[in-house]
Image (cartoon, rainbow, N blue to C red):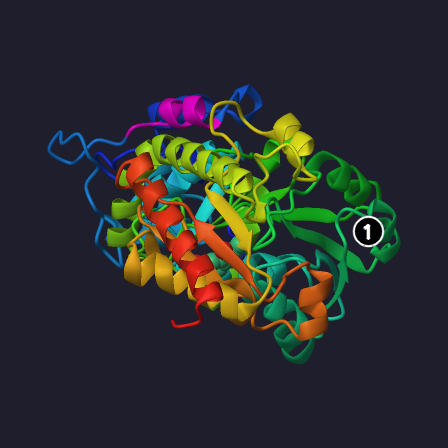
Amino acid sequence: MAETGVRNVFSGKKRAGSDDVDRDDYLVVSKKAIVTMPPSSWEDPETALANARHEFGEHGGVNMSIEASATFTVMEPETMRRMFSGELGPDRDFFIYSRHFNPTVLNLARQMAALEGTEAAYCTSSGMSAVSSVLLQLCSSGGHVVASRTLYGGTHALLTHFFPRACNITTTFVDLRDLEMVKEAIVQGKTKVLYFEAMSNPTLTVANVPELCRIAHDKGVMVVVDNTFSPMVLSPARLGADVVVHSISKFISGGADIIAGAICGPASLVNSMMDLHQGALMLLGPTMNAKVAFELSERIPHLGLRMKEHSQRALNYSKRMKRMGVKVIYPGLEEHPDHYLLKSMANKEYGYGGLLCVDMETEERANRLMNNLQNITQFGFMAVSLGYHETLMSCSGSSTSSEMNAQEKVMAGISPGLVRMSIGYSGTMEQRWNQFEKALSRMNDSTLFPKN
Ligand SMILES: *Cc1c(COP(=O)(O)O)cnc(C)c1O
């Protein structure tokens, strides 16, 4: 196994002088860089991000330089052998090839590790590649996964259809709220992973992370949590999860312009995934481009501000919707079944997340509302995805969860009229609320006088 270690993710000192000089000061600098953010002293995501090492540009720029190279030179031929044997690695600024490690992508990985309070992280080309690679690394042929019934459609399809066909990895789906069911579904020795979303798509069910981790760990099972819906709000690794995966394409990017993902977890896992012979990341190659990593790393410092505003508006609208008699699902509302659970686990000041769901009961009414909201009052856009500055809305049953059959949707609590809204922060709160009210009142009119 390539010894491209524990320290990789927390270091990236610029090379100076001859590269095969294993000087002590290199080590000292590397170690210092590591201790600036030891997971053990992690308090909250904002503090950890501020404490993460700041990388300056090559010419003293406040922003890091982009290392836009696929391959890296050495000064002496012997260095190459030492890099391949694992003796010299990215922790001392020795890079081989950018599918393995790239300094710019590594810097984003450092930020992701700080965000989630994990020892290490690795950034991938999409959320799905993060999910699939980590599961393929942890499960072998014949392996078993226990997963929540309410999952992102793509992940659900991966577990239901692709894994059994491609590699004989099977999954038992459970109701996460039924802890006995979770316990019973775990087959000791065979089950490798318990997989769920911290806040689930699209029904906004919140997982009892500490309790689920206790159950899994008692049986020697790793816990992998998708935290795409709740970055900053929840920190699953700090609540016991072994691995946190992200679709960076959503809130973390915030621009609805980039597809990307990340795996945050122990350094030993990242290492194993980079192994030259057995590593899912190294061998399947879902690598992130350095230019993309640079763009994303510039957005992470304002993720906290954005999450606060998404959450604040989602809470405000959901309260007003409720008052108007709209059937709204939002974990920030006291009557949401997971409200107090979420409150007990959430990091302070980030609210309850930027997503809410409006249940319009039928797909026809859902479509009519979305049409009014986009085409008449300009409240938001009909589009899948989330975390954008504009509000995005989609009817989950016929879009992002359409991979599920009718029964699976009922089991996951997805009504045919469920409109998922990722609440944006552009425009003023009152301006946007007026747009919502107007669209809703027009809908009631057209129920009385069926026209559009
Ligand atoms: C979007 C999403 C994914 C997949 O991420 P991509 O970046 O689109 O590959 C996985 N999980 C959740 C919860 C998502 O919302």
Residue in the picture at 59% in, 39% down: 331
Say whether residue 272 is magenta: no
Q: Give how far across and how far down residue 38 sits, in percent.
A: 51, 24
The kind of residue on which mark 1 rests is: Val
Asked if residue 201 lies left or right of residue 17, the reply is: right
Q: Is residue 235 above or below residue 250?
A: above
Pick the residue in front: 319 or 34.
319
Asked if residue 159 lies left or right of residue 152, the reply is: right
Asked if residue 337 lies left or right of residue 68, the reply is: right
> In the rendered image, is residue 303 in sight?
yes
Residue most toward the left? 59
Q: Which residue is mark 1?
A: 182
Q: Which residues are magenta?
A: 45-54
Label 1 residue SS:
helix
Pick the residue in front: 156 or 331.
331
Q: Give how far across and how far down residue 82 sits, in percent.
A: 40, 49
Pick the residue in front: 195 or 342.
342
Q: Give how far across and how far down residue 83 sits, in percent.
A: 39, 50
User: Which of the 4 image quadrants contains residue 18?
Assistant: top left
Q: Is residue 23 above or below residue 18?
A: above
The majority secondary structure of the magenta stretch comes to helix
Residue in the picture at 71% in, 54% down: 193
User: Which of the 4 image quadrants contains residue 1?
Assistant: bottom right
Say whether residue 47 is magenta: yes
Residue in the picture at 82% in, 51% down: 182
Pick the residue in front: 197 or 87.
197
Residue in the picture at 26% in, 46% down: 294
Residue most toward the front? 449
Q: Is residue 272 above or below residue 402?
A: above
Image quadrant holding the C terminus, namely bottom left
Q: Give how far across and how far down residue 106 sits, in percent.
A: 37, 44
Q: Is residue 223 above or below residue 152?
A: above
